[in-house]
Amino acid sequence: MQTACLVVRESRPLHGTTTLTGAKNAALVMMASLILTRGKSILYNVPFSTDIRHMAQLLQQLGAELFYDKDMQTLYVDTAHIRHYHVEYAMMKKMRASVLVMGPLLARFGTVSIALPGGCVIGDRPINYHLQSFEKMGAQITQVGEMISATISKAHSADIILEYPSVGATENILMLAVQTEGITRIVNAALEPEVLDFIVLLQKMGAHISIVPPATIEIEGVDELRPIEHTVINDRLEAGSLLLAAAITGGVIHLPNAPARSLELFLYKLQEMGHSVIIGQDNIGITLHATQEPKAVSFKTGPHPSFPTDLQAPMMVAQVVADGESVIEETVFESRLLHVRELQKMGAHITVEHNRAIVRGIEKLYGGPVIATDIRASCALVLAGLVAQGTTIITGIHHWRRGYHDLEGKLRHLGANIEIVGGQSIIFQDELRELKDVVL
Ligand code: UD1
């Protein structure tokens, strides 16, 4: 069978309006957290990406019943009969977010066994903060090779100080702490928009959580949590990718449901490049009119509200075809510059020094065969293909499918010349046992 690839051809300026789908990174942790409840929950605005499908399969292996309504982008999950606390090795390796079931399984069963998670190869990606925090709350952890097991007879509250505001560690600690007696504090917690939306969901379940500025989360344990209905926030990373697609092609785009507050530094940088950015009422909705003479800007990634690391690769493409020099510093993941080599193949002038890329803007990129190495790199290569002379053929598109819900369809709707060729289409529903008569 032919390997699937994304075929992108030089496109006219993108024009039009498109709505966003739900944030994958928020939906994944929300799905994991349903393990904390016993009963039927509904998540609305859940994107149809492979990572979501894998998390659904993982929950199903644990004993949950799921039904995904693709047209409504709604996921129904019944967690009443979850009975397993062991996650298969192969399932753990499918994505990094699989580690997020550790906290809720520990909370529900007092024991869990998993393997080190897989995911994008963008750095070492240890889980030491997760494990150390669980230990601090009373867990006994054994690691043999890649296999990890943990038990906890009675979790106790703790003051947990994160050396770095890790998104995953913050979420995992939250999930153990919500039912742990006493007050647990996470100091130097991650406060990404996806974490904040997740806290809202936990509060709907009945959790007692407050945020103490500048970055401490206080959790007072409760005895029981209840099933919920929740609408996942819109994907700021999809918004950023679409805005960049319009910016680099010199187009105009309107995203009526884009969360502008979640993208402040990114939008500021687009304006610094010379693009016009108009924010809607109550900070919802973004319109971008691209300048025809974009200026290169420098930026450095960091925890929210700094520049998001997940937009570093796509934003780099905008610098590749801008006027001047840009210095891009990646501070979140140490190996997140693998897309540079592929962009160089397309003619980009980029040099790398440790975690910094120095980009010298050029007039034109050239299409050819390139390889997507991670989710956001796949997006960067698609953007590059839109302004490259000729045809860009991108392999490794399982990364694209892991992260985006028909983003190629949205780009096409705006005028992009993009298609997926070969390979199998994604079958989601057929892989899930149907949950009949879902009534809340
Ligand atoms: C999440 C996002 C990912 C995003 C990242 C940073 C999901 C599913 N994924 O990933 O898209 O790029 O946040 O915004 O939400 N670290 C440790 N030890 C740990 C945990 C993390 O050293 O125990 C380090 C990591 O190697 C990395 C940094 O902390 O250098 C940030 O990682 P983290 O915030 O945990 O990212 P993820 O939760 O994996």
Image (tube, grey):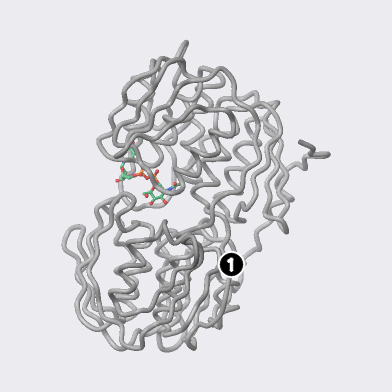
Quadrant of the rendering where the C terminus is positioned: top right
Q: Which amino acid type corresponds to the residue marked 1 in the rendered image?
A: Thr
Q: Is residue 8 left or right of residue 340?
A: right
User: Residue drawn at (43%, 26%), measured in percent from left and top?
Assistant: 219
How many numbered discs? 1
In the image, farthest residue toward the front: 281
The answer to whether 49 is drawn above or below residue 366 in the figure is above
Tell me if 388 is positioned left or right of 114 in this view.
Answer: left
**Front position in the image: 263 or 298:** 263
| Residue 302 position in % (x across, y down) | 28, 52
Q: Residue at x 28, y 29 (%)?
A: 161
Toward the viewer: 90 or 231?
231
Q: Please determine whether, in this image, residue 289 is positioned above or below residue 227.
A: below
Q: Residue 185 in the image: state x and y as whole percent.
A: 35, 26
- Residue 35, quarter of the rendered image: top right
Percent x, y for residue 17?
57, 75
User: 280 above or below 389?
Assistant: above
Q: Which residue is mark 1?
A: 19
Describe residue 159's horizontal placement relative to residue 117 as left or right.
left
Which residue of the protein is positioned furthest toward the right in this rendering? 437
Nearest the viewer among 370 and 136 is 136
Where residue 241 sits, quadrant-wise, is bottom left
- Assign a secondary structure to mark 1: loop
Task: Give neighbour class at mark 1: few <14, some 14-19, many 20+ (Cα, 10 Å).
Answer: some
Residue 233's place in the image compared with 81, above or below, is: below
Q: Under 8 Å from ligand 1: the CB of mark 1?
A: no
Residue at (45, 73) in percent of width and height: 382
Quadrant position of ligand 1: top left
Write the residue at 36% across / 88% down: 292
Please state the horizontal and vertical placement of residue 126, each as a whole percent of the image.
33, 38
- Quadrant into which the N terminus falls: bottom right
